[in-house]
Image: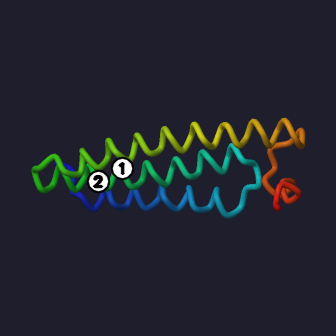
Amino acid sequence: MVPVEYYMLLSAAVFCVGVFGVLTRRNALVFLMSVKLMLNAANLNFVAFSQQWGNLVGQTFSLFTMALAAAEVAVGIGIVLVLYRNFKDVDVTTATSMRW
């Protein structure tokens, strides 16, 4: 049996990598992958605590989070495609002319 602290440490590391990717990269695809990493870190915590306490509530929340991540990717890919079609680049800083 692996202690839950190891899962929390792994989850914190994955979440930090995701935050680093969101804060430092300008590519929209890398931005989406970094958000997905942060959601997966939360899923890892949900499943680890669910296993520790012996119930399925954390796994149920994890399934809902995966559905949310799938919807986020679908909307995000649509935005990336519009960004590429209009600016021929997926750099999020070039889309300042899309404002009102």
- Percent coordinates x, y for residue 55 in the rendering: 12, 49
In the shown orientation, is residue 45 left or right of residue 76? Answer: left
Q: Callout 1: few (<14), some (14-19), or many (20+) C-alpha neighbours within 10 Å?
A: many
- In the picture, the disc for residue 43 is 1
On screen, 61 above or below 63?
A: below
Q: Residue at x 47, y 59 (%)?
A: 13
Q: Amino acid at mark 1?
A: Asn
- Percent coordinates x, y for residue 97 in the rendering: 88, 57
Q: Amino acid at mark 2?
A: Phe
- Percent coordinates x, y for residue 56 in the rendering: 16, 46
Q: Residue at x 51, y 49 (%)?
A: 37
Q: Residue at x 80, y 43 (%)?
A: 83
Disc tally is 2
Nearest to the observer: residue 56 or residue 6: 56
- In the picture, the disc for residue 97 is none
- In the picture, the disc for residue 46 is 2
Q: Which element type, helix, strand or loop, lies under badge 2?
A: helix
Q: Are marks 2 and 1 in contact (CB under 8 Å)?
A: yes
In the shown orientation, is residue 27 left or right of residue 55? Answer: right
Q: Callout 2: few (<14), some (14-19), or many (20+) C-alpha neighbours within 10 Å?
A: many
Nearest to the observer: residue 69 or residue 34: 69
Quadrant for residue 85, please give it.
top right
